Image: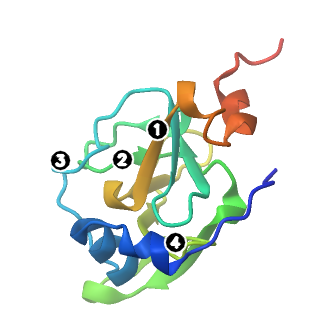
Amino acid sequence: MDHKRYEKTAEATQKLNSNQYEVTQNDATEPPFQNEFWDQKEDGIYVDVVSGEPLFASTAKFDSGTGWPSFVQPIEPEHIVERTDRRYGMTRTEVRSKHGDSHLGHVFPDGPGPGGTRYCINSASLRFVPKDRMQAEGYGEYLRLFMPPEK
């Protein structure tokens, strides 16, 4: 459960590099296989680069072969807003962060696992918090995602 307040601030958006700004604020898409996290394998969580709200965990990440980070599910579904996207002559489901209102990417119904979802996310919309930094950065409650399942 969230105990922190996540929000979009002018200061946070001013700190974005040009690629992060274009992706999160202008709904751009970064190139496949040429982004920071497409092949990242380290344990940790991915948070909104603007608001810091926790979005995805490395435990839900998989190699979709698309060249973008892909996840089967978000950490907290209430942090994700889905919108119909009819740009470029197709209908897709855009995903945005709830508090940061950052464009993250899209969700598709072709993923592995029981839910069958694939959250295809732009690295530029994310900041990675390694597992060993999660407590110090205020995300300690999500360390449970890395615990072995109870028997």
Sequence-wise, which precedes: disc 1 or disc 4? Answer: 1
Q: Residue at x 47, y 63 (%)?
A: 107
Callout 3, which amino acid? Phe
Q: Position of residue 147 (x, y in %)?
A: 70, 20
**Above or below, comparing residue 49 to residue 22 in the picture:** above
Q: Residue furthest top?
A: 151
Q: Are marks 4 and 3 in contact (CB under 8 Å)?
A: no
Q: Position of residue 52 (x, y in %)?
A: 56, 58
- Disc assigned to residue 73: none
Q: Are marks 1 and 2 in contact (CB under 8 Å)?
A: yes
- Disc 4 element: strand
- Measure the C-alpha gap from mark 3 to mark 2: 9 Å
Residue under circle 1? 61
Residue under circle 2? 69
Sequence-wise, which precedes: disc 2 or disc 4? Answer: 2
- Measure the C-alpha gap from mark 2 to mark 4: 15 Å
